[in-house]
Image: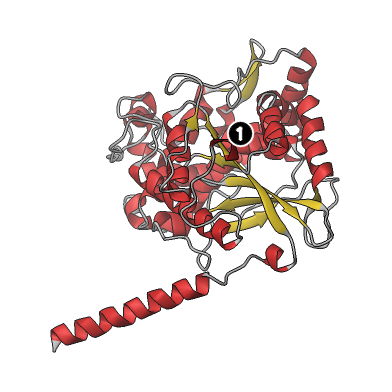
Amino acid sequence: MKIAMRRNITAIGLAVLLSGFACVANATSVLTEKGYTLEKLLVFSRHNIRASLVGKDDVTATHSNRQWNMAEVPAGHLTYKGGAAETLMGEYYRAYLEDEKFIPADWHPAKDDVRFYANSFQRTIATAKHFASGLAPIADIEIEYHLGIDERDPVFLPSSKFTDEALLKQATQWYDLLENGQGQKAFYKNRVQDLREIERIVDFKNSPFAKKEGIKQMDGSKFEITAHKNRIFSNDAMRKPYSLADCVIMRYYDNPNDKEVVWNISKPTRALKAAGKFLSDGGSLMWKNPAFAKNMTRNLLPEIAKGLKSNQRITFLCGHDTNVGTLLTVLEVEDHELPQTITNYVPIGSKLVIEKRKGADGKLYASFDMVYASDKQLRNLEILTLHNPPVKEPLVIKGLKRNEDGLYDWDEFVNYFDKRAQN
């Protein structure tokens, strides 16, 4: 009886699975249904889940009283889970592009059809490789990178030094305008409660650093971003809590159990949301600074503009949250808080996705979206399908017109990137 029952359950499960595949075959996108044919895809991706940047011997580790489970990969490298998650994203895009009739089944692209270009860090190269493996599993898509492993490619991470004194002055003056002109101090003061949640997660008051200094809390009034030698720096007091928040968030994505992530403290979900907000807000202190964003995208924007005008059918560029955040600023994308994630400005593994489409009217259009796995999907390594897709949020560029379907005129869109690249 047990064997027969097990066989029946298996048969039912197989039937459900097959019926799911039957549904997927008809899951045409809304734009396609409205007569827009996909002609080109450009993706700028943030790397997926990485190991913490804080090693066990790092001084930041002394600010925590917790026993950290160090990743099985070196600090800063893509984790095994991050690789699996990115492969799932690539597999989703394979299903999506096949459904769009953009690529055939068992696609093997010609060399000139695609370009995969990553910063020379292990985590960015590996992210691009995993996405390519999911997208075209029987092809051997080459991942382009230009320097030694973990060296900074200036296209993605140029020198942060300002060569334009006027631009540096604009960058520093921007901090005086925070919080409706109240400045940096008000910004940090308004985030003290989030800081306290991070301290609670890592048990800061019992940490070696806190005991040595005879303190119970970190002093947010000492946080400061200043200019020095033509660069903008956050001070040491500020970097430590942001590094701790980053460690917590990487634990969060590595483990779907909130209580385990925060060592079973009370109200774990509240604490994790605070850590995500603190980390996102901290990133925004650089990303949303127009002068800093202009300086950091000076090589990247021309690269993207070149990709938009190329004959490549698929262009995939892979960098960092700093790249995505500063691109949003320099392109003057309307501010947003993304749903289904606690890192709600630039989620881990998130992608700026540009599609070139030909309308039924014969004109060319561009869609511009942020695509990312929700926290639930990412933490549980859910298989992404046309019926369990990643989150897709449209990005609205200030001053650039969209039609009734939310699409930009293609030529106007490309010219806009060109102008931003030249300014």
Crowd around label 1: few <14 · some 14–19 · many ≥20 (10 Å): many
Which x, y percent locates residue 304? 67, 34
* In-image side of 272 versus 347 (left or right): left
Q: Is residue 188 visible to the viewer in this orientation of the structure? A: no
Q: Which residue is mark 1?
A: 323
Q: Nearer the viewer, residue 253 or 263?
A: 253
Q: Secondary structure at mark 1?
A: helix
Q: How many marks?
A: 1
The relative height of residue 369 versus residue 34 in the rendered view (above or below) is: above
Q: Nearer the viewer, residue 355 or 230?
A: 355
Q: Residue at x 55, y 33 (%)?
A: 220
Which x, y percent locates residue 379? 41, 55
Q: Quadrant of residue 286?
A: top right
Amino acid carrying label 1: it is Asn
Q: Residue at x 78, y 51 (%)?
A: 365
Q: Is residue 274 visible to the viewer in this orientation of the structure? A: yes
* In-image side of 11 versus 358 (left or right): left
Quadrant (top left, top right, bottom left, bottom right) of the N terminus: bottom left
| Residue farthest top in this picture | 229
Q: How is the image coloured?
A: secondary structure
The relative height of residue 225 versus residue 52 in the rendered view (above or below) is: above
Which x, y percent locates residue 181? 78, 35
Which x, y percent locates residue 259? 35, 56
Q: Nearer the viewer, residue 27 or 291?
A: 27
Q: Residue at x 14, y 85 (%)?
A: 2
Q: Quadrant of residue 419?
A: top right
The relative height of residue 165 versus residue 185 in the rendered view (above or below) is: above
Quadrant (top left, top right, bottom left, bottom right) of the C terminus: top right
Q: Quadrant of residue 360?
A: bottom right
